[in-house]
Amino acid sequence: MDKDPLAHKALFVFLSLTALTLPFDGYNYGGIGSFFRILASFTLYVFLALLLLSPRIRIDFLTSVRSPIAGVLIAFVAWSIVTSAWAPNPNWALSRVITYVGLLGMAFAISVLPLSKVVGLWRVILLGSLISLPLGFVLPHPSPVYMESGRFSSGGKDPNDYANLVLIAFLVSMFGTASYAHGVSRSLIVLSGWFSLMAIPLSGSRTAIVSASLLIPLGWLTQGLRGILVGLIVLMLFGTTTFVLKDSEPFRGYYETLVGRAQSLGEIGDESTWAGRIDIWRAAWYVFTLYPIGGVGLGNFAWVSPQYSYTAALIASGREDEGGGVAHNTFLSVLAETGIVGFSLFFALQVFLFLHLRRVYKRHPLAKGLLLGLLGYWFASLTLTWEYVKVPFFLYGSVLAFKREALK
């Protein structure tokens, strides 16, 4: 029984408001950042205040910190901060330091929640994804490049970032949180999840398409015959919906873009399919060979990449800050910016998370959803620079909440 329900409820309210804005954090308001950044700042103040005022929150926090997952996460963030000392662009490094410290605080704030409230938090993220879908047709996108590309997005985000975020929210909710609901509530979660998933074909994100094609059937298989039957029905409905909408405006353009990008997956050996990523990946590896121990410095691969990549140099020529392309691969980005030390800590963190979820997923449906969400994060990380985005830290905090319950 929760002996301090008011503290947990207060923290949950602020975390929920922050989570709701997660799909919209691409918008920058008046130079002060997104709604997520603004609300996250208030949430961290509340968390720090509760650490001082609430014995229950303090005990839960100290329990979370004792876990190996927390230790490796703290070590990775700490080492990443250390590498900013030799970064050629200190301002970019400082910006990433602030991001990491804030997200680390968010992860530990989530880690002290009861599991019932962690379930609620992911339902809120799904709700934000659901709201963002229709708003993507109404709100202007801050980047005209995305608007002209024929690819759907929302919340001011890159189409790939947006689609993969929605997919992770879907996986955790559909195969995790839905199991804790019954009757009408469960039906609403399922319907909301499948509706929000339309963001993937609309965005034309090849990474999200491949990831969804692998992980959603995997989720169905874990649910036995019932899950497989539900999957077949959903596939038929998805196919029917696509067929009906493909000749309607504004879906016609998105459909044509989707078909073209899906067909390009059959030409995986062609460098043009990768949109310059292979050139940048080579540059990231080369930067690592130049700075193998500590990397080039936190947040600074994009600063030096124009020196080693033709693609990055083209990107830099169109930017006022002269920054080039990011690594477009989380693992190579960590390797190039923080060296073998940072990469070892980051890799160990992912292994610890996977092993813990693999150990408990049969007993806790939420763990199954988080495990699929973690796999979705890994897929996204193969083509996106995602070590410092928000959603993995929500996954980290959720797993820490599981670990805390086990340590009690």
Image (tube, rainbow, N blue to C red):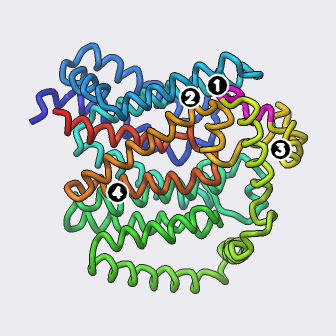
Going by the picture, which residue comes out furthest to the top? 52
Give the magenta-colored segment's residue range: 293-304
State how far apart marks 4 and 3 are (Cα): 36 Å
Residue type at tag 2 = Thr
Upstream in sequence: badge 1 or badge 3: 1
Res. 274 image quadrant: bottom right
Question: What is the secondary structure assignment of the residue under circle 1?
Answer: helix
Q: Is residue 131 visible?
A: no
Question: Of the numbered discs in the image, which one, if any, rests on residue 369?
Answer: 4
Upstream in sequence: badge 4 or badge 3: 3
Res. 232 image quadrant: bottom left
Question: What is the secondary structure assignment of the residue under circle 2?
Answer: helix
Cβ–Cβ below 8 Å for labels 4 and 1? no
Upstream in sequence: badge 4 or badge 1: 1
Residue 198 pos. (x, y %): 53, 68
Magenta span: chief secondary structure: loop
Per the image, the residue denoted by label 1 is 95
Q: Residue at x 40, y 64 (%)?
A: 192
Question: Of the numbered discs in the image, which one, if any, rests on residue 312?
Answer: 3
Would you say residue 297 sits in the magenta stretch? yes
Circle 3 or circle 2, nearest the eye: 3
Residue 297 pos. (x, y %): 68, 26
**In the figure, 375 relative to 76: above or below?**
below
State how far apart marks 2 and 4 are (Cα): 26 Å
Residue 197 pos. (x, y %): 49, 66
Q: Residue at x 31, y 76 (%)?
A: 227
Per the image, the residue denoted by label 2 is 99
Cβ–Cβ below 8 Å for labels 1 and 3? no
Q: Residue at x 51, y 71 (%)?
A: 213
Residue type at tag 3 = Ala
Residue type at tag 1 = Ser
